[in-house]
Amino acid sequence: MKKVNFNSVLLGALTVTVLSTSYLGLINLLCCLGFIGGILVTIWHATEEGGVQLDNKQGALSGALAAILAALLVLTLDKAILPMLGIPTSEEVIMQVITEAVSSSDEQLAWEMQEQIDAEKALQEQNGAGGLAFISAILFNGLFGAIVGMVGAKIFGRNLPKIEEEG
């Protein structure tokens, strides 16, 4: 099996990260479009650089690695860096959009939603749910990245030669 192209994994992870933070994170409300696009960038770049079609294993591995790296980068940005810079996180932006949409029709419901959000944040901080969120993000991203990576391996490089097994 050919080695994974780390440059492709890094490019895909950075694409997912950019499309998943701050206001750009809204694109992921459309069926995780930013995430899927970033993983497909990984596979596309790997086939273009290598000049060969990736098999399912390589697509899955490349997609999973890019997704896990992206999860680490997004969590670092959303939980540490963006708040220090005063830039709203993707979660805050999404909640703001939802709250504004609801408040235009029902102000009492918007107030109750904000109260619930604040209570959930306090509970997460109290129970240390950050570690659980971190682990679940890594697992979910890895699994979803592997699936998208396999799909990407079928899409890209169809006209390129297949990788020969190294013995």
Image (cartoon, rainbow, N blue to C red):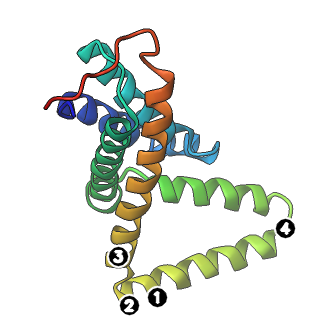
Q: How many marks?
A: 4
Mark 3 vs mark 1: in front: 3
- Mark seen at residue 144: none
Decide which of tag 4 and tag 3 comes sooner along the chain.
4
Label 4 vs 2, first from the N-terminus: 4
**Mark sitting earlier along the chain (1/4):** 4
Please state the horizontal and vertical placement of residue 20, each as a whole percent of the image: 44, 45
- Looking at the rendered structure, the kind of residue marked 3 is Gly
Residue shown at the point (42%, 34%) measured from the top left: 38
- Read off the residue under disc 2: 127
On the question of residue 158 being in view, the answer is: yes
The disc labelled 2 sits on which kind of residue?
Asn
The answer to whether residue 31 is above or below residue 40 is below
Disc 4 packing (10 Å; few <14; some 14–19; many ≥20): few
Question: Mark 4 = which residue?
Answer: 106
Name the residue type under label 4: Asp
Q: Which residue is mark 3?
A: 130
Dot 1, how many residues are within 10 Å of its Cα: few (below 14), some (14-19), or many (20+)? Answer: few
